Amino acid sequence: MNAHPLRVLIVDDSRIFRSVIEESLAGRSDIQVVGSVWSGQKAIEFAQATPPDFVTLDIEMPGMNGIETLKGLRELGAQRKIPIGVLLVSSHTSRGAAITIQGLEEGAFDFITKPHGPDPLANAALLRELLLEKIDAFKSRRFVRSDVSSNPVSQHPSPHRETRFRAIVIGSSTGGPEALASLLPKLTPSCPVPIFLVQHLPPGFTHYFASSLARRCGTRIMEAEEGMRPQAGVVYLAPGGKHLMLHRDDEGVLTVLGDAPPECGCRPSADVLFRSASMAYRGQVLTVVLTGMGVDGTRGAMVLKRAGAHIMVQDEATSVVWGMPRSVVAAGIADEVLPISKIGAALRSHLGMGD
């Protein structure tokens, strides 16, 4: 348990927005705002003199930009051997989305977008809700030990299962972009089955995420569209704000996008994708649940498990937030619990791809 309040540094070139963030964090005895600075350079200087536990970081600032500042803060955390959590604060612009994705892949804890509705009071209330949700998730990861064991149920694929799978489905949230940037290059482009992915991101962000992952992996990673026929080795990413489902017709499997209400507060939802995959591929699915807040993916994984799918989750030690994976383990349906560095090899083994 933490011995002192979470020490928060606010970084934003807008004095007004710095004040809004500070007011949003007021009244919590477990949170202490230790500094408020207007530039990336000032943030690094402050963190060197007074190391914070957590930083809210505007990603679009003059001078030293948000990505450079993020890298500097992560280096300081590595030197102290106590990582600094960095929450990116993004605009709703295309540039803001692209930089946010880069920051998440560089190891930022998570991000929020600046509320921009017509009602200032509603914007302030939403900002407070978003900030406290992310900070509480960070605190739970940093200070609270889980009561669910993350020891693997099985670390060895069964030889008779190596060639029966016809698709991979993946669900991820907080910490997912960094995890996926590590995992996917180990699978693509030689993967013999299609890969379907739900990463919790809002509309306007998934296009940049798909493009960034494609550059890193050197293969086809795209936002899923209505009516696509899945191809082996291609990653289909659920668009922000849309559920991704798989449907089987006389010609095979095709992708379907939907506007049904969010599930577990999420659209896209891993539960929705997983349930549809159980029907489209008749259980011949490798299912992966990566780092993330909440429980999205558990109910869908239960359906897949009953259909005969193999379920693996990221372990607690390498998860930014062990929420989604923990929920699957707690439900008793995880076949393997592995560090992110070993999930790719396990998937390759199940698919008979070799080393």
Image (cartoon, grey):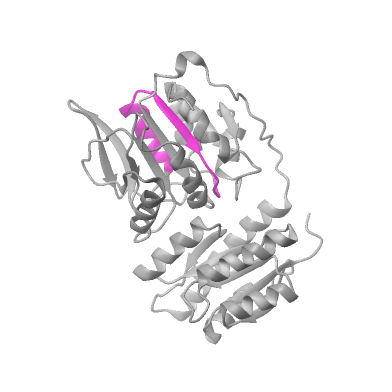
**Residue 282 falls within the magenta-colored stretch:** yes
Relative to 74, 13 lies left or right: left
* 167 in relation to 318, above or below: above
**Residue 201 falls within the magenta-colored stretch:** no
Relative to 264, 252 lies left or right: left
Residue segment shown in magenta: 270-294
Residue 352 visible in the picture: yes
Q: Position of residue 293 (x, y in %)?
A: 55, 50
Q: Position of residue 41 (x, y in %)?
A: 60, 79
Q: Position of residue 225 (x, y in %)?
A: 25, 47
Relative to 274, 12 lies left or right: right
* 183 in relation to 44, above or below: above
Residue at 64% from the left image edge and 59% from the top image edge: 136
Q: Using the image as rendered, state which of residue 230 and residue 351 is in the foreground.
A: 351
Q: Position of residue 42 (x, y in %)?
A: 62, 80
* 332 in relation to 184, above or below: above
Q: Quadrant of the N terminus?
A: bottom right
Q: Quadrant of residue 75?
A: bottom right
* 268 in relation to 6, above or below: above
Residue at 41% from the left image edge and 36% from the top image edge: 169
Q: Using the image as rendered, state which of residue 268 and residue 290 is in the foreground.
A: 290
